[in-house]
């Protein structure tokens, strides 16, 4: 099994979001990308303390703290049994972490994009706001887009649809879910 992780930076960026409201979108997105690198390094440290070999690769060059993202090098790290942690998104503003995860998944020939989130799958409406929300066990890419289910940005879902890359949406907070997803068990919602 080979694992590539794409990390977000929202926990840092949300801390400055009030100040960033009047900020140029490109500058704000670049700050978000830098925050993902901080999270990638923190995750690397945590995994390596558990004896798990990792490599952090970034889309923005910062050789002093991480390797530059080079597709073939990432694949080689995966083949050697390392977890590759991708930071700095795609290095382009206006693209989300979801789009970066989809792009990296396609580039490394992933079997699935596993979207770890704070809810246990995809619902017909926000389960945090609507007690009668119904969870899908499986849902089509087209329904996610047409019904604007909001689980991922539309460009990420469309890229997965166009390339037949399924998405598993699951609750990160549930202990053991990452292993269950990795082992192919039915967890959360499968978008295909």
Image: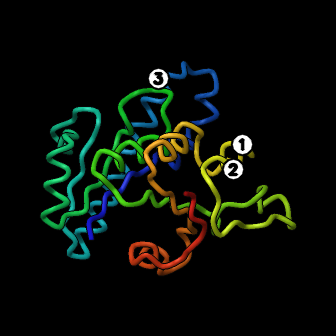
Q: Which residue is mark 3?
A: 27
17 sits to left or right of 50: right
Q: Is residue 22 above or below residue 111?
A: above
- Rendered residue at 44%/32% (across/down): 31
56 sits to left or right of 20: left
Mark-to-mark CA distance, 2 and 1: 5 Å
From the image, which quarter does the N terminus lie in? bottom left
Who comes first in sequence, dot 3 or dot 2?
A: 3
x, y percent for residue 106: 35, 47
x, y percent for residue 34: 37, 37
- Rendered residue at 37%/60% (across/down): 111
Q: Is residue 31 above or below residue 123?
A: above
Mark 1 and mark 3 in contact (Cβ < 8 Å)?
Answer: no
Element type where label 1 sits in the image: helix
x, y percent for residue 10: 52, 46
Q: Is residue 99 above or below residue 50?
A: above
The answer to whether residue 123 is visible is: yes
- Rendered residue at 50%/28% (across/down): 94
Please tell me how crowded label 1 is: few (under 14), some (14-19), or many (20+) other residues with Cα within 10 Å: few
From the image, which quarter does the C terminus lie in? bottom right
Mark-to-mark CA distance, 3 and 1: 31 Å
Q: Which residue is mark 1?
A: 146
Q: Which residue is mark 2?
A: 143
Who comes first in sequence, dot 3 or dot 1?
A: 3
The answer to whether residue 12 is visible is: no
Element type where label 3 sits in the image: helix
Mark-to-mark CA distance, 3 and 2: 34 Å
Please tell me how crowded label 2 is: few (under 14), some (14-19), or many (20+) other residues with Cα within 10 Å: few
> Mark 3, mark 2: which one is toward the viewer?
2
């Amino acid at each position: 099994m080979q694992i590539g992780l794409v990390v977000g930076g929202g926990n840092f960026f949300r801390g400055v979001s009030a100040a960033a409201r009047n900020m140029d979108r490109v500058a704000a997105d670049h700050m978000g990308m830098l925050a993902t690198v901080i999270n990638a390094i923190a995750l690397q440290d945590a995994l390596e303390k558990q004896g798990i070999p990792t490599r952090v690769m970034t889309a923005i060059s910062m050789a002093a703290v991480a390797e530059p993202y080079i597709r073939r090098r990432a694949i080689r790290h995966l083949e050697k049994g390392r977890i590759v942690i991708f930071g700095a998104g795609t290095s382009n503003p206006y693209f989300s972490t979801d789009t970066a995860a989809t792009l990296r998944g396609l580039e490394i020939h992933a079997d699935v994009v596993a979207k770890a989130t704070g809810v246990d799958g995809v619902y017909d409406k926000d389960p945090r706001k609507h007690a009668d929300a119904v969870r899908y066990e499986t849902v089509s890419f087209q329904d996610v887009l047409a019904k604007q289910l909001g689980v991922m940005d539309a460009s990420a879902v469309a890229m997965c649809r166009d390339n037949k890359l399924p998405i598993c949406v699951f609750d990160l907070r549930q202990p053991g879910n990452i292993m269950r997803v990795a082992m192919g068990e039915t967890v959360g919602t499968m978008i295909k």
